[in-house]
């Protein structure tokens, strides 16, 4: 009798311990952040090859601000609070490595670069989806858009390729187990939504604050894994035929500070907009 | 072959964003039928016929999840044999249209700003610092139209015929808990606003925004702000325009006490007419402006408001 009850108790202890171990092993968050290279916000924009290509000479490249400030930093915060890992993925050639190292310095766990020159959003999204398919990420973070192409297309396309839900233009995310609650910008306001299970999001202002990598981060980034994988076979569906710079504005017409009525007259009679 | 436009409704009518998209579709149709797919509550043809749309496919349930919208549009595009599928470039359009591009094996061109022919589309890139002509290499093109870039063109046409449409859209895995409207003052949301009065650090503090709001009210304009103003909490985040905020292209943009940093200009330089009010004649914003007043906002704004009211 006594022996029996001891065995039952031991068994229940073992069950509880096993649950803790499996919680620890299996409930670690596995996050993916898509990180793209973009020209610095102050770059002079010009084109070469008869307007077919962006002129990169003298241009400083940075992590696309939406990817860095909002998507990456929030993913790192979630993992700091709950345990787990943040992997970054970038489609690009070796010229992307410096910005990938910066993402690692900010706090990503490891990085993957899919070795292909990005052509259009369909190609980039298909490559990321093909890579992510068998990796079991809980959440795929993207920035709202890149500051060069401003498309806001890749996150939705990844979601479609992988059959996942997509929360667009999110300003906050809280995660509890497999359930995530987000606030997202929609026409005329914000939606508060809940998603169960894996999904894709695009992040914008509000998600988190910019983080400057510290010395320790920069040192450790050098030894963190940056794995280069071959691109799968996908095709592009569109291409830029020509870039053009906008026409230069004429001179600004100055109106005297005491003569607001003259400005109103010009807006009405010359510009014809009021 | 047809051009398919996706139009959500509000209060039984097409949204303005939807009517603009229909007008654009009519302009690029060159002989193809323009078919509107409408989801949600609709009374009559919801004002769509006057943009030149001949048929309306009506899906009576209101849907918000981009995966469901994508399934609905894909189903209609397949039935109708659409060669071009047009969405508004608002947040909802930008979330659903790329999905349709994948499911239709189509080329995707977001943020189209003007009418061009065939499979070539003109769009803004580099945050408004350049435009690109994009060629689609696939049979089907999916495009979004930058809000307020084309306008609603009334063709005076008759009512469109309305047919019920049904499709298998699947379950939504995104549960909507609540919706919070951004402005309850009845002004037009920034991305759709035709007139915008915007202010920066030159206003000195949040308590001084009365003169900005007065001018906006007199003009029927929506208010906006520069990034530091949003960051310091002087104004709500959703008013922040620029490279890292929202991009707008109103007919009239009045910048008060804003220096005109390149990142700010990126979000507003497609405005049709820019007016700058700044004490510093060397402020970079004057180079991007059509009209300017070198002066103190605290003196100029009240006078300008009076002059507008006197019209
Ligand atoms: C990566 C990056 C992204 C950025 N994104 C954005 C963005 O999206 N949007 C944005 O706005 N900024 C952005 N910025 C910040 C931008 O560089 C500028 O710092 C910011 O736009 C300045 O805001 P401001 O014009 O309100 O303030 P200031 O630059 O301080 O200018 C204030 C102006 O007010 C004038 N002034 C002062 N008093 C008066 C008065 N009484 N009457 C009239 N005029 C007066 C001054 O002459 C001055 O020109 C970004 C910066 C970076 C690095």
Image: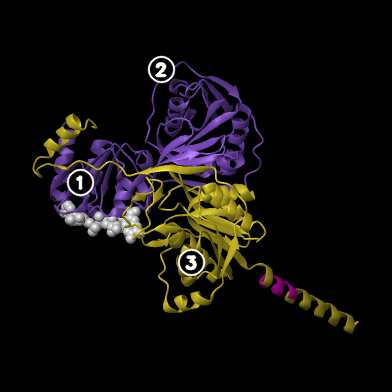
Chain colours: A yellow, B purple
Could you tell me if the residues under marks 3 and 2 are in contact, i.e. CB atoms within 8 Å? no
Instruction: Please name the residue that numbered disc 2 is placed on.
Output: B156
Name the residue at 66% across, 41% down: B170
Within-10-Å neighbours for mark 3: few <14, some 14–19, many 20+: some
Marks 3 and 1, how far apart at CA = 42 Å
Counting from the top left corner in percent of width and height, residue B124 is at: 38, 43
Instruction: Please name the residue that numbered disc 3 is placed on.
Output: A97
Q: Is residue B109 visible?
A: yes
Q: Give the side of residue A222 with respect to residue A159, left or right.
A: left
Could you tell me if the residues under marks 2 and 1 are in contact, i.e. CB atoms within 8 Å? no
Residue B45 lies in the magenta stretch: no
Please state the extent of the stretch shown in magenta in the rendering: A18-24
Counting from the top left corner in percent of width and height, residue B115 is at: 40, 31
Residue farthest to the top, as pictured: B158
Please tell me if label 3 and label 2 are on a single chain. Answer: no
> Which disc number belongs to residue B276?
1
Marks 3 and 2, how far apart at CA = 57 Å
Q: Nearer the viewer, mark 3 or mark 2?
A: 3
> SS class of the residue under badge 2?
loop
Q: Quadrant of ligand 1?
A: bottom left
Residue farthest to the right, as pictured: A1
Front position in the image: A244 or B54: A244
Please report, as a chain letter, where disc 2 is located.
Answer: B
Please report, as a chain letter, where disc 3 is located.
Answer: A
Within-10-Å neighbours for mark 2: few <14, some 14–19, many 20+: few
User: Which of the two labelled residues, at mark 2 and mark 1, occupies the earlier sequence position?
Assistant: 2
Q: Is residue A125 above or below residue B85?
A: below
Q: For residue A17, what is the image quadrant?
A: bottom right
> Which disc number belongs to residue A174?
none
């Amino acid at each position: 009798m006594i022996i029996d009850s001891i065995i039952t108790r031991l068994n229940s202890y073992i069950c509880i311990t096993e649950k803790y171990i499996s919680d620890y092993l299996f409930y670690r968050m596995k996050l993916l952040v898509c990180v793209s290279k973009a020209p610095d916000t102050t770059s002079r924009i010009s084109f070469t090859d008869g307007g077919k290509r962006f002129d990169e000479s003298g241009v400083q490249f940075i992590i696309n601000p939406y990817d860095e400030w909002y998507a990456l930093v929030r993913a790192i915060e979630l993992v700091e609070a709950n345990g787990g890992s943040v992997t970054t993925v970038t489609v690009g050639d070796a010229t992307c490595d410096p910005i990938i190292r910066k993402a690692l310095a900010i706090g990503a766990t490891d990085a993957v670069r899919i070795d292909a020159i990005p052509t259009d959003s369909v190609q980039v999204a298909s490559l990321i989806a093909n890579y992510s398919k068998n990796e079991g990420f809980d959440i795929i973070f993207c920035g709202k858009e890149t500051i060069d192409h401003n498309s806001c297309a890749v996150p939705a396309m990844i979601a479609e390729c992988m059959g996942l839900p997509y929360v667009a233009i999110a300003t906050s995310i809280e995660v509890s187990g497999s359930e995530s609650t987000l606030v997202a910008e929609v026409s005329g306001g914000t939606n508060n939504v809940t998603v169960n299970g894996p999904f894709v999001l695009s992040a914008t202002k509000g998600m988190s604050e910019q983080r400057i990598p510290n010395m320790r981060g920069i040192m450790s980034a050098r030894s963190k894994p940056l794995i280069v994988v071959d691109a799968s076979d996908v095709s592009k569906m569109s291409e830029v035929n020509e870039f053009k710079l906008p026409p230069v504005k004429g001179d600004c017409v100055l109106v005297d500070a005491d003569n607001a009525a003259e400005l109103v007259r010009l807006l009405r009679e010359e510009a014809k907009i009021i | 072959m047809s051009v398919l436009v996706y139009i959500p409704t509000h209060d039984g009518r097409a949204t303005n964003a939807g009517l603009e998209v229909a007008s654009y579709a009519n302009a690029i149709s060159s002989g193809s039928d323009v078919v509107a797919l409408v989801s949600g509550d609709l009374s009559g043809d919801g004002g769509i016929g006057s943009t030149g749309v001949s048929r309306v496919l009506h899906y009576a349930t209101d849907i918000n999840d981009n995966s469901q919208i994508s399934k609905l549009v894909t189903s209609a595009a397949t039935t109708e044999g659409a060669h071009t599928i047009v969405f508004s470039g608002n947040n909802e359009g930008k979330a659903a249209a790329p999905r349709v591009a994948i499911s239709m094996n189509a080329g995707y061109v977001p943020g189209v700003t003007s009418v061009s022919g065939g499979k070539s589309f003109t769009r803004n890139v580099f945050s408004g610092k350049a435009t690109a002509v994009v060629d689609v290499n696939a049979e089907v093109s999916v495009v979004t139209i930058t809000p307020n870039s084309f306008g609603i063109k009334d063709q005076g046409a008759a009512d469109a015929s309305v047919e019920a449409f049904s499709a298998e859209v699947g379950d939504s895995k995104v549960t909507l808990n609540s919706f919070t409207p951004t402005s309850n003052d009845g002004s037009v949301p920034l991305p759709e606003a035709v007139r915008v009065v915007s202010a920066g650090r030159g206003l000195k503090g949040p308590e001084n925004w009365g003169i900005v709001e007065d001018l906006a009210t007199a003009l029927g304009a929506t208010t906006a702000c520069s990034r530091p103003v949003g960051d310091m909490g002087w104004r709500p985040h959703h008013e922040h325009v620029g490279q890292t905020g929202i991009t707008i292209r109103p007919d009239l943009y009045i910048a008060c006490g804003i220096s005109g940093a390149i990142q700010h200009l990126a979000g507003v330089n497609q405005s049709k007419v820019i007016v700058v009010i700044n004490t510093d004649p060397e402020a970079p914003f004057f180079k991007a402006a059509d009209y300017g007043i070198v002066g103190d906002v605290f003196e100029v704004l009240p006078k300008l408001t009076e002059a507008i009211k006197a019209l």
